[in-house]
Image (tube, helix red, strand yellow):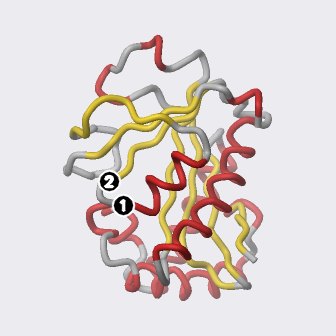
Amino acid sequence: MVRLRNVHEIGPADGLRYSGHMVQAVRRHPHLAHEAPDDAEAYVSRWQAYRRLRTAKRVAHQGYVREHLIVDNGQAIGKADAWPQLFPNNESSALIGERPIRLAYWHQWPSQSGAEDIGHHAMTDLMHVATAPPLKADSLWLVALPEDAAKVAVLRGLGFLSQGPPQSYEIGDAVTVPRQLWVRHDTHYM
């Protein structure tokens, strides 16, 4: 069963165990260096992964960032985040709303259908996190690689709409390749 584990709630023993899982997840994700290069670098060894989880726990404790591990049958297989951030590239504020929340997720996947199933569960849970207190988003957004068919299918299935053509977005995640912007405004229906 796929679920999200808030890094703020992960103790030291689980943190060590999940750190090893995350290193394996990064190695099994063929496009992570393009999709999330910061994570690809952070999870190269168990020690670095553990340090990354501890840092994420400390940051989550201090503010509104919600970082989660995607866990399937007790094994960490990816990461999902929600945090307040304005739209990238000075997109029109009419698209944003007053409380936009940026979402992001990645995970290892066994197949296209498996990737869609895992992504759907992770995004549904993440959308609930983003629209509940203290975040209370009135719009959700994320960027995705246009060639990531599984993520595109998940986003369309959850009511996200693509905005304009793919382009390079400077959002602080070190990705330089063009990505598609996806937005969902009707958060009160979740």
With 93 as the anchor, is 169 left or right in this view? left
With 176 as the anchor, is 92 left or right in this view? right
Circles 2, 1 touching at the beta carbon (< 8 Å): yes
Q: Amino acid at mark 2?
A: Leu
Location of mark 1 (residue): 148
Where is residue 16? Give x, y as percent.
62, 85
Give the residue displayed 66% in from the left and 44% down from the top.
62
Give the residue displayed 73% in from the left and 68% down from the top.
3
Where is residue 59? Give x, y as percent.
59, 50
Q: Relative to residue 54, is residue 176 depicted above or below?
A: above
Q: Relative to residue 182, is residue 139 depicted above or below?
A: above
Q: Residue 92: which quarter of the image? A: top left
Where is residue 180? Give x, y as percent.
33, 42
Location of mark 2 (residue): 145
With 12 as the anchor, is 79 left or right in this view? left
Give the residue displayed 65% in from the left and 40% down from the top.
63
Q: Residue 31: which quarter of the image? A: bottom left
Element carrying mark 2: loop
